[in-house]
Amino acid sequence: MLSKIKAARSGLRKSEQKVADAVIEDPDEAVQSSIHAIATRAKVSEPTVIRFCRALDCVGFQQFKLKLAQDLARRGTFFYQDVTAQDTSKQLASKLLDGAIASLVQIRDQINEESLDRAIALYEACSRVELYGSGGSAVVAEDAQLKFFRLGKPAIAYSDPHIQHAAAALLDRDALVIAVSHSGRSSDILKTVEIARAARAKVISVTATRSPLAQCSDVALTVDVNEDSDIFSPVKSRLGQMVVLDVLAVGVAVRGGEHMLEQLARARRAIDFKFVQ
Amino acid sequence: MLSKIKAARSGLRKSEQKVADAVIEDPDEAVQSSIHAIATRAKVSEPTVIRFCRALDCVGFQQFKLKLAQDLARRGTFFYQDVTAQDTSKQLASKLLDGAIASLVQIRDQINEESLDRAIALYEACSRVELYGSGGSAVVAEDAQLKFFRLGKPAIAYSDPHIQHAAAALLDRDALVIAVSHSGRSSDILKTVEIARAARAKVISVTATRSPLAQCSDVALTVDVNEDSDIFSPVKSRLGQMVVLDVLAVGVAVRGGEHMLEQLARARRAIDFKFVQ
DNA sequence: ATTCATTGTGTAGTTTTATTACAAAATAAA
DNA sequence: TTTATTTTGTAATAAAACTACACAATGAAT
C-alpha cells in the first residue's frame, strides 16, 4: 500500500499529492488520524482526502486506513534487533529468528525472475553439475548437491579450494558450475570460476549483488542480506542461499514433469526406509 | 490480539462474551464492520461493543479494529501453498520462501526457554563437543561445527554413521554430543546416542518433538515443521535446525562476556582477510 | 423471602467523523 | 478573451462512535 502510494503519487492531482506526502511522511500517525486531522496536516480540504483514498482504489477513508494499517503491520513484523547480554534465552531466540525471517522476506521481495529462468535453462542444457563453496559456503554447496544429484544428472560438491581449481580445469562445455560465496570476493572462488570459464563451462553464482563473482558468472542468483549483526559467519545469507538453491532445484523438478517428480518420490522413500517405527 | 480475545473471553461479562464470539467467528468480517453491524450480529447493544473494546485495553472501537486488522495481517502473511507446474518462476520462489518463512515463524513461537537454558549450561560444563548428523542433517552438523569450534572448545562433526559409532564409544563424561536428525527416528543416530550415553557423555538433540531421539537425550531442542510439501529432503527443518543451533551458539557466546565476543571478532577478521578489494 | 447494594445492559441523546452535493476557483483549449 | 473542463473547497447531510443515564438482573444480608 505504501509503495502503491509512492507509485501513484505522480499520477495524482496537486492537492492529492499533498495528502500522499503527508501519509508517506508519517504513516503510523496517518493510520490513527481522522480525515480532519490528515486534511489539516496536508493543508487541504477533507473531501480531497477522500478523493485521494478513492484514487487508490479504496471505497472510502476507513478502508484506506485499514489497508495501510495492515501494510504497516506486515512491514514491521520482523525487524532486526541486536542481541544484548541482558537478554533472556527466549528474547535471544526471538531476536535471532526475527532477523533470519526478515532476511528471507527481503530475499523474497528481491527475486529476479529472469535470472532464475536462465539458471533453470542452464541446468536443463548441461550434462553434469559441480558445486563449489568454501568455509561456510561449503555447507550450502553440499546441501545443494543433495538436491541436484537427485534430479538425474551427476552432481558433486567440492569444498577444498585446491581441489576446486583442479576440478574446474577438467570441465567442458557441457558442465555447469554452481559457485557459492557469501561475499563473492574470495580470491579462491574467483580463481576457480575463471578456470571453469576458460574450460567453457557455464557458471551460476549464488552470491551478493554486484560482487566480482556475480559479475563474472553467466547467471547470478543474488542473495543480499543485512549481516552487520552476525556474531558468527553469516548464518542469514547461508539460509538465504540454501533457499534460493532449493528454489532452483524445485524449479527444475517442476519443469521436468511427472517423470521427474516420481523419481524424487522414490528417492525419498528409499531414505524413509531407514527409520525406526 | 485474537489470542488476547480468546484469553480474555472468560473474564468478560456475558454480553461482552457474545461480542467476543462474534469477532472470533469471523475476524475478517469484524474488521470491516461498524459497531452497529457487530452489535446486531452479536445480538447486543452498541455500547456493549464499545465496552468490549475497552475491556481489551483499547481506547475505542476504532483502535480495536485497527489492532485486530494488524493482527490478521501479521497472521496471514506467509501461508504455505503447494507449488504447481503452472507456476511462473517468481510464483514458485515466493511460495517456497513463504513456506520457509512460515516454518521459522512457527519455530519462533515454539521456543522452549528452559531447554535452551539447559543446553547452554551443558555446553558451559563440557570440555569438548562432537556433532553427529547424517544425510541432510550432516550439513547442519557441519554448519554448527563452524560455530562451536570458535567458542573455545574443540568441536568436530561426523557424518558417517560408522565413524559416529566409533567416536561415540570413545567419549567420556566431559564430552557433549549434539545429535541432529530431522525425524529423530533414524536407527543409526539412535544407536550412536545410546553408545554415547553409555560412555556417560551428555547429549543435546536437535530433532522433532516426542521422537525417540528427543526422548533419549538430556536436552531436546525441538524443531517441528510442516514438511508434507517438500519435494526434496526437508529443507525447512534444516533451516530451522541451523537457526536453533545458531541461537544456542550465540547464547553461549553472549553469556561468555566480553572476552569471548572479542575472540569471535578476531576469527571473523581472519576470514575477511582473504577477500579481494 | 425481601430488601438493598452492586453489577450489568440497553435506550436515547450528543458529538465526532465520513461522505455528498454543489459552487467557486483554477487550468487548459478554442 | 471566452468557453469548457478539471480541480478544489464550502456547506450540508448522513452515518458512525461515544456518553450519560436509567432500568434490569444478580447476589448478599437481613
Image (cartoon, coloured by chain):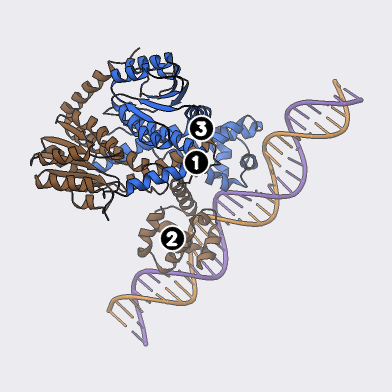
Chain colours: A brown, B blue, C orange, D purple
Instruction: State the residue position of label 1.
Output: B71
Residue under the point 37% across and 45% down: B268
Instruction: State the residue position of label 2.
Output: A52
Q: Position of residue B168 (x, y in %)?
A: 37, 18
Provide the secondary structure element on which disc 3 rests: helix
Q: How would you rate the neighbour count of disc 3 (Cα within 10 Å): few for under 14, some for 14-19, many for 20 or more?
A: few
Residue under the point 11% across and 43% down: A201
Q: Is residue B205 visible?
A: no
> Depth-wise, is mark 1 or mark 2 nearer the camera?
1
C-alpha separation, residue under disc 3 versus residue under disc 2? 33 Å
Q: Position of residue B43 (x, y in %)?
A: 59, 34
Q: Position of residue B210 (x, y in %)?
A: 44, 19
Instruction: State the residue position of label 3.
Output: B25
Chain to which mark 3 belongs: B
Say which mark, if any, is on residue A109. Answer: none
Please give left or right for residue B142 compared with residue A132 in the image: right
Viewport quadrant of the C terminus of chain A: top left
Q: Position of residue B273 (x, y in %)?
A: 31, 50
Out of B231 and B243, give the one closest to the viewer. B243
Q: From this view, report whether residue A223 is shown above or below residue B159.
A: below
Q: Amino acid at mark 2?
A: Phe
Q: Amino acid at mark 1?
A: Asp
Chain to which mark 2 belongs: A
